[in-house]
Image: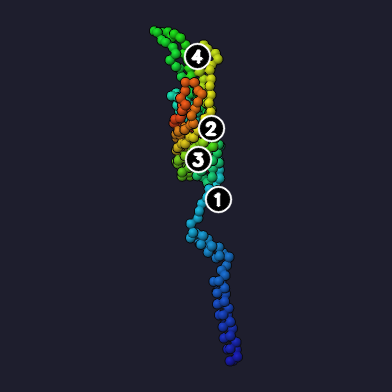
Amino acid sequence: MKKSTLVIIATLLLQLSYGQVVIKRDTIYPPEEDKKEVVESKQESYPRVETLFQNQKSFGGYLGISMGYTQIDGEEAFTVGGRTMFVANHYIGIGFGGKGFMTMPRSDSLHTYNGDNYYGSKTYIANAGGYGGIYIEPVVLSLKPIHVSLPVLLGAGGIVNEIWTDGSDPSTTSSSAFFICEPGLDVEFNIATWFRIGVGASYRFTSKIEGLAEASPYLLEGANYGITFKFGWF
């Protein structure tokens, strides 16, 4: 009887001591899942530095077509443009694009008028050309139905000045090249997941334009108003 009692007591002591060893081991060497939770909690306790191309959730791109109105050398002009953009994480686009423009012909004062008849001939002046380069487009709150984008175009272009007279052929032309920076601001509307419309304005800053007949060296500087249709993945 005493011997069996001693065996039972010894067995209980061994079980208790083994349980303490397991508990201590689990405390010192936690399971893999617990290790992962500890590491993640430690990472969350430190601020994370976000970079443009690291840990991105989304990449996309779009094709944009734009139409606009402006004034060049004091005359009304219309613009047509396009751009191809890569979009990183919904908030910045980088790509290439450009615009073409043409003014309405302007008649100068080289004619006289007497009663119902014109004497002499009319001379007309018109400007046409285009420019293009790199587009950089930060976007604010891109996933909201209505948001703002800030496109900037950096590049170069050329302009042709044409002068002709009634009944005279050929016309006289001159041309010039220039550098341009055109920052803008657009209000955008998310029509669908693949389609957006932007309405806004931009301003053209150019280098000095020389060699054009009867034209200001800064005839291209001025505001541009337009609408842009964007098709793609945002």
Label placed on residue 110: none
Q: Position of residue 92 (x, y in %)?
A: 51, 43
Q: Looking at the image, is mark 3 or mark 4 earlier in the sequence?
A: 3
Residue on which the image places disc 2? 156
Q: Looking at the image, is mark 2 or mark 1 earlier in the sequence?
A: 1
For the point 50% across and 55% down, the residue is: 48
Q: Secondary structure at mark 4?
A: strand
Residue on which the image places disc 1? 54
Mark 3 or mark 2: which is in front? 2
Cα–Cα gap, marks 3 and 4: 44 Å
Cα–Cα gap, marks 4 and 2: 31 Å
Q: Farthest residue to the bottom: give it.
A: 2
Kind of residue indicated by mark 4: Thr
Kind of residue indicated by mark 1: Gln
Q: Nearer the viewer, residue 20 or 152?
A: 152
Residue on which the image places disc 4? 165
Residue on which the image places disc 3? 137
Q: Looking at the image, is mark 1 or mark 3 earlier in the sequence?
A: 1
Q: Secondary structure at mark 1?
A: loop
Q: Secondary structure at mark 3?
A: strand
Cα–Cα gap, marks 4 and 1: 61 Å
For the point 45% across and 33% down, the residue is: 203
Q: Position of residue 195 (x, y in %)?
A: 52, 38
